[in-house]
Image (cartoon, helix red, strand yellow):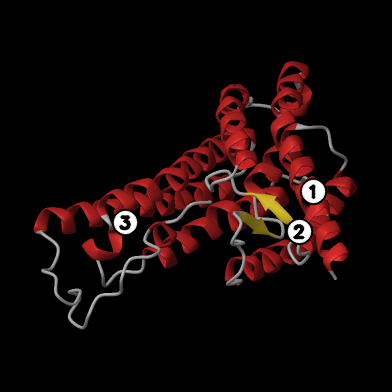
Amino acid sequence: MQDVGEAAGGVRSPAPGGVAAGREGPSNLRRFLGWCVHFYTATGLIAAAIMAALLLEGGPAAYRWCFLLMAIATIVDATDGTLARAVRIKEAVPGFDGRRLDDIVDFLNYTFLPILLIGRAGLVPAGTEPWLVVAMLASLYGFCQVDIKTPDGYFLGFPSLWNVVALYLYVLPVPPWAALAIVLVLALFTFVPSKYLYPSQPGTLNVVSTILGAIWVIPLGYLLWSLPADSSPRDDPRVVRLALVSFTYPLYYVVASWVVTAVHWSRSTAGA
């Protein structure tokens, strides 16, 4: 997940008063463009507010729109960093913390609302919904870790992609107890020092993952658009088959990440 704060990394901190030493302040145009980028990031909060209202309503139509809004929020999160770098956001708006804004938006759209949907849609056994708080707390821990992104371009621990987890638990015929077990195991993996691919970072495997992810968008978009508004997607064999086809990329992501982790652990053991 890219963020505005990360995109500004390496920029010299401004001197008191918001102007870097020896430099003039940002032009009005750059300041305006900087605020536009922050507003673009903040549109994820608008999507989150709509999703919250839909989840209160409940039902297949509401869940369908929730997943579509999650996809839109993910697109915003994937592109705002590029825009932030283009305007040199820390210089354009030095008094505003874009990373903090991005983390708030991401926690809502990648963790809180997807996990709330898992409980609201009855994807786990009735009465076990309080256990979903474990996943929220684990994700909160992950978001607050300083070293959550490794120097060699990976996420450390499960990267809180609960929107993807919620989608496939909703679409595929996963038994409720198995769904709860998957959620708890993934929450546990947040604390395991395993490496997960970070496609926007340098590296051959990350580049390959970016290309495959771009291809994945095609069946994923078709899947989201095909979600029924009046019944469970599990009742439509065509939607389930489409979900299984699109699931190949998340499966690749997990397998490739754990191969990288196994190699890293073996090298660490050999060098000990």
Specify the quadrant of the image occupied by residue 264.
bottom right
Q: Position of residue 94 (x, y in %)?
A: 26, 69
Indicate which disc, 3 or 2, sits on the residue closer to the N terminus: 3
| Mark whose residue sits in front, 3 or 1 | 1
Residue type at mark 1 is Trp
The secondary structure type at the circle numbered 1 is helix
Q: How many angstroms separate mark 3 from mark 2 (CA)?
A: 32 Å
Query: Which residue appears farthest toward the front when viewing the image?
Result: 271
Q: Position of residue 79 (x, y in %)?
A: 41, 43
**Neighbours of disc 3 within 10 Å: few (<14), some (14-19), many (20+):** many
Residue tagged by mark 1?
258
Q: Earlier in the sequence, mark 3 or mark 1?
A: 3
In this image, 34 relative to 268: left or right?
Answer: left
- Label 3 SS: helix
Mark 3 — residue? 38
Residue at (57% x, 36% y) in the render? 210
Alpha carbons under labels 3 and 1: distance apart: 35 Å
Placement of 271 over or under 126, stated as above or below = below
- For badge 3, the amino acid type reads His
Give the answer, above or below, for where 245 lies relative to 39: above
The percent coordinates of residue 267 (x first, y second) are: 82, 59
The structure residue drawn at horizontal position 47% and vertical position 39%, both measured from the top left corner, is: 72
Dot 1 or dot 2, earlier in sequence? 2
Whether the residues at callouts 1 and 2 have beta carbons within 8 Å, the answer is: yes
Task: Report the side of 19 relative to 86 (left or right).
Answer: left
Look at the numbered disc 2 and give the secondary structure of its residue: loop
Front residue of this view, candidates 244 and 170: 244
